[in-house]
Image: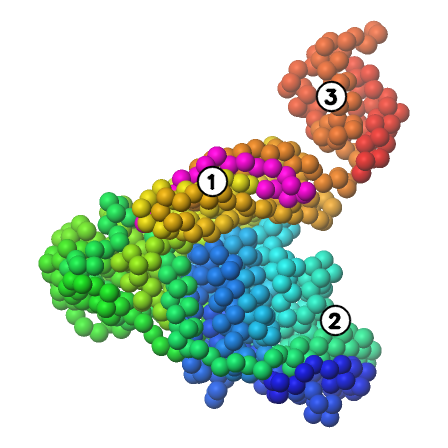
Amino acid sequence: MSQSTPPTAERTPSVDQLTLEEKASLTSGADFWTTKPLPRLGVPSIMMTDGPHGLRKQQGASDHLGLAASVPATCFPPAVALGGAFDPELAERVGVALGVESAANDVAVILGPGINIKRSPLCGRNFEYFSEDPLVAGVMGAGLVRGIQSQGVGASLKHFAANNQEHDRLRVSADVDPRPLREIYLRGFERIVKHTQPWTVLCAYNRVNGVYASEDPWLLTRVLRDEWGFEGVVVSDWGAVNDRVAGLPAGLDLEMPASGGRTDAQLVEAVLRGHLDEAALDVAAERLLRLVDRAQSRPAASGIDADAHHALAREVAGRSIVLLKNEGDLLPLDRRAAIAVIGAFAEQPRYQGAGSSLINPTRLEAALPELRRLSEGEVSYSPGFSLDGSGDAGSLRDQAVAAAAASEVAVVFLGLPAEQESEGFDREHIDLPAEQLELLDAVLAVNARTVVVLSNGGVVAVPFADRVPAIVEGWLLGQAGGGATADVLFGLVNPSAKLTETIPLRLQDNPSFGNFPGEFGHVRYGEGLLVGYRWYDAKQLAVAFPFGHGLSYTTFDYGRPTATVESTDLVIEFDLTNTGDVGGREVAQVYVSVPGSQVQRAPRELKGFASVQLGAGETRRVRVVVPRDELAYWDVRVDRWVVEGGGYVVAVGSSSRDLRGEATVTIEGDKQLQRLSLNSSVGELMGDPVAGPIVQQALAELMGGASDGDQEVPTFDVGMEKMLASFPVGRLVGFPGLPVTLEQIEGLIGLANLGR
Ligand code: BGC
């Protein structure tokens, strides 16, 4: 593919110039990673490849599970870590680097970001996803897409949609009710599509409410294109096509990888037999031509500055580390201290997960040499346990314990063995290996000044949290994670990341427990809207560390927030002060509650955040704008987003459970779209701005004990009013003692409907 040819209208053939067979051939892959060329018309083939936290371009043998080797590329922190920065600009810088590396390798589309919601901590691919919250996933994913596409390379937003587990992933139906589907599982996709127009969307393997994502006209056309305005190409996840003849008119444009011509022939035959409208094939082929054209228009690629990208990977890793606990300011470590580094992960880092996102890094930093490089004291090392089962467990432990006893501080690197988390299967529990927990106990018994550093792609239980003074959650930090860990431990970098997912006390507390991973091809999303912190808060459950939590080596003070409506947006402002004596960064979070809501709501939902760097003692006015759309819930009666009117409580804070101030603001509701009828309830009529006051007045009169001729009027009290509220208004006509006529009620409904 030529990289420097300028785009010209003449260069791209029009779809009318293609034969039926050529159109069919253009809409499926040539091999594992490339589309088919049309040499007769000068249409080249383009390459797409993984994603999402580095480029995985395979050279020799191809597979989609990262088995065969790929070209060296910078391995940035996977989404599990990057998300914690809560900083879309940082994500955008990573995206730019991904775009540069893709372009330099002649890759037209990189398969990422993955933004699926972490419904269960057991999902084997959670390390590839950002959060249990759709705002975080959407904002961070959008940053990556913007960065990638700024380099003339396409992103592929995946996996669309409701792909929240690996178990039976190619067949299972995610059975999700409309509100959680829209408000939790689709919301991040909606944001990214509307704000960034990814060149492609990768449709998921699974079914959504019984229909394969790869052949669902509702998902791929009505929602994605008609509602959100998607203009790009829908690509199948690798092997996701169940029935291409059904998929194509539903909105699946490109089947990947190749089907060896089998499904192309099916399309041709379906058109010839009149089972498939050729116009649908024209649309898909046209989209493919545009995608190839876009890829062709990329400016000439520059070279890759591997050092600069490695430095960026280190900076991002430093921004991704979450300081969970730091009792007595044990951290940062004194550089002159005698340190016992314990745990095999210090020397053999776990820095990415397994499967299709497996990067062949340009270099790899372990924490141990980096700690030694920065230390001015003595740093001993004992593996403590073995990652491959070799060595004698008892003597490995004894040696580590002796080293801990002889040092001022012990830094223990614990984590999940690589084979426990991968694409393709889910975890069975969230526990660290028992031998690691036993090692930690033995170390604690001889040295109370112990720091735990965790390496894990999915959440792990931390039963030691009360006994260990300092805990650093390192997730999987990419190729420069070792250096970044050393930077944080010695205080060269002040940690600032926050948890994008709750760390529960027990797996059993998780909302999906009992409904994961389903059976016989179905998984029921029984927790509905209450995913992640929404559930723990609604149930008032204790957690190990809450969503949004993350400490710093300094402290921050929040001034009293104000909440106002500017044009239509909700604007929150407050002063944020760094009250400590070192510079630091705070991710200030804005949560919204709607106390009197007429629909089910979580106690609070994240609606905005700001990552703010402050020098020691510095105060800054922080302004967070929450666009009105963010306040909407999905109204199943009218099948659209609706902003409810009323009082909204806005809380700002340092985590979902460390709220520092709140303000109340009145939001004007959307115009009601549902027309009232005789079957509407008294309560619904009372909620109407026009009819409501009239009904209230009538009730007040009744409660005042008005008499109605000869008839005895029932005594109205508040309990009675509540009971009456559920009555369809039409059924009250003629009710003994109720002086209301059909004409009066119809008049009232007519008045109310004028405003609807
Ligand atoms: C994964 C995708 C990946 C594709 C290509 C699939 O198995 O689900 O995330 O992009 O393979 O490797």
Give yes or no for residue 555 being in the magenta stretch.
yes
Please rate how many residues cluster around mark 2, counting C-alpha atoms within 10 Å: few if below 14, some from 14 to 19, many from 20: many
Give yes or no for residue 108 being in the magenta stretch.
no
Amino acid type for the residue under numbered disc 2:
Pro
Nearer the N terminus, badge 3 or badge 1? 1
Residue at x-position 74% and y-position 71%: 249
Amino acid type for the residue under numbered disc 1:
Asp
Give residue 374's position: percent from left, percent from top. 24, 65
State whether residue 497 is above or below residue 104.
above
Give residue 724's position: percent from left, percent from top. 71, 24
Can you see residue 1? yes
Quadrant assignment for the C terminus: top right
Q: Is residue 644 left or right of residue 441?
A: right
Alpha carbon of mark 3 to alpha carbon of mark 1: how far?
43 Å
- Circle 2 is placed at which residue position? 249
Residue at x-position 68% and y-position 62%: 224
Amino acid type for the residue under numbered disc 3:
Gln
Residue at x-position 81% and y-position 32%: 752
Range of magenta residues: 553-571
